[in-house]
Amino acid sequence: MVSNAFPFDRKSSVPSVPSVAKTVAKKLVAIGGGGGVSPLLLGARPYFTTLTAVIAVTDSGRSTGTARALADIPAPGDLRNALATLAAAPDSLWPRLLQHRFHSAAVPTLDGMAFGNLLLAALAELTGDFGGAVETVAGLTEPLAHVLPISTVNARLCAELEDGTTRMDELAVRGLNKPPIRRLTLDPPDAPAHPPVLQAIAEADLVALGPGSFYTSLLASLLFAGVVESLRETRARVVFICNSTTQPGQTDGMTALNHVQRLVELLGPGVLDVVLINRTPDLDEALLADYAAEGLHMLRPDDAEIEAIAALGVTPEVRDFGPQLGQRRAQWNKQDTIRFDAARLGAALAELAAQPT
């Protein structure tokens, strides 16, 4: 069964948060990884007439990495997950089939392979059109949002670390026990964004960045040529959804302020309008200690840090987004984070979209 990363009732149109007016004829674009963007859009669905998921394509891990090498394509895994999670009927055959993984000790290369990754690879190889392959699979799952790859170029994510060394491919970039990441690059460095993505950003009323892996999903997506320029030119309000915790191998030791600073450095001044920051009272300290033992430290900015964020020209919206402590997804080679309630995030985005720009 395909499950949502956040607890959210698809049949309910009213989240358990203060009521917000229904937004009419508003377009929301969400940029990041499939595990963060998809549930966010499900939570925002009651309020927006058009939803677009712009999905990262630089993952080089296990099943996705094999499919990339097989067909010389961008990473299909997050796209596959988004197409299945956002499906109109997520428990029907095609979404379940996309998420099905082979288990075979006799064929190690395919052990753990998601069928949807192979399907996207086969379609791209057959037609020579990765973007078209995603559209074809979307026709099978009928997702509740437009699902677009950030790029159709098979680009590698690279990182320069604080000690001057470099890491090639996302699996190494997010590897544990290494110096902090100084900057990210792509190979090729001029890899273009998928044109429909730039059009969606230009036509949006609100663009949400995140939640998700800060470096390997969000910042990696913004590196494709044309994305930053489009964010600078769009009339949409640009909103960053700050993660609940640090992420081992990526944001160790970083504060919420550090996240916003890195994003402002990349986008330039005056581009990022709002940052959504969680502040939940009375968290279970024992559970937080368990997460901290795994390298996941809760981001808990105080008033001074919030003021420093505002001094960057970014409006901090501090709310209780109902982080789901104790609920962990199975991850491969990385720790899961503490995830926000999607309905609360969706309602917050609706309120921002309803405000005059």
Image (cartoon, helix red, strand yellow):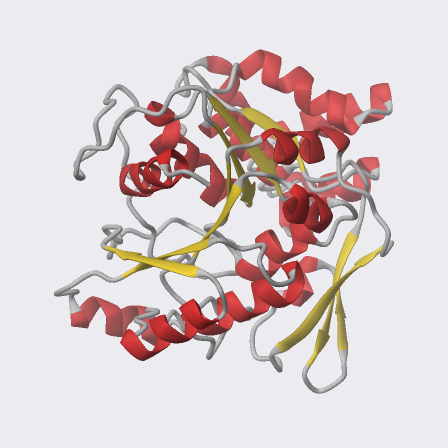
The residue at the far bottom in this view is 163
Q: Is residue 187 left or right of residue 264?
A: right
Q: Position of residue 158 (x, y in %)?
A: 75, 64
Dividing the picture into quadrants, the one containing residue 315 is: bottom left
User: Which quadrant is the N terminus positioned in?
Assistant: top left
How many marks do you count on the picture? 0
The residue depicted at 46 percent of the width and 41 percent of the height is: 357
In the depicted structure, whether residue 70 falls above or below residue 310 = above
The answer to whether residue 100 shows anywhere in this view is no
Front residue of 268 and 259: 268
Front residue of 51 and 82: 51
The residue at the far left in this view is 282
The residue depicted at 28 percent of the width and 44 percent of the height is: 341
Q: Position of residue 13 (x, y in %)?
A: 25, 22
The residue depicted at 70 percent of the width and 46 percent of the height is: 227
The answer to whether residue 139 shows anywhere in this view is yes
Front residue of 86 and 204: 204
Q: Is residue 171 left or right of residue 250?
A: right
Q: Position of residue 344 (x, y in %)?
A: 27, 41
In the depicted structure, whether residue 297 falls above or below residue 76 = below
In the depicted structure, whether residue 239 falls above or below residue 159 = above
Q: Position of residue 307 (x, y in %)?
A: 36, 73
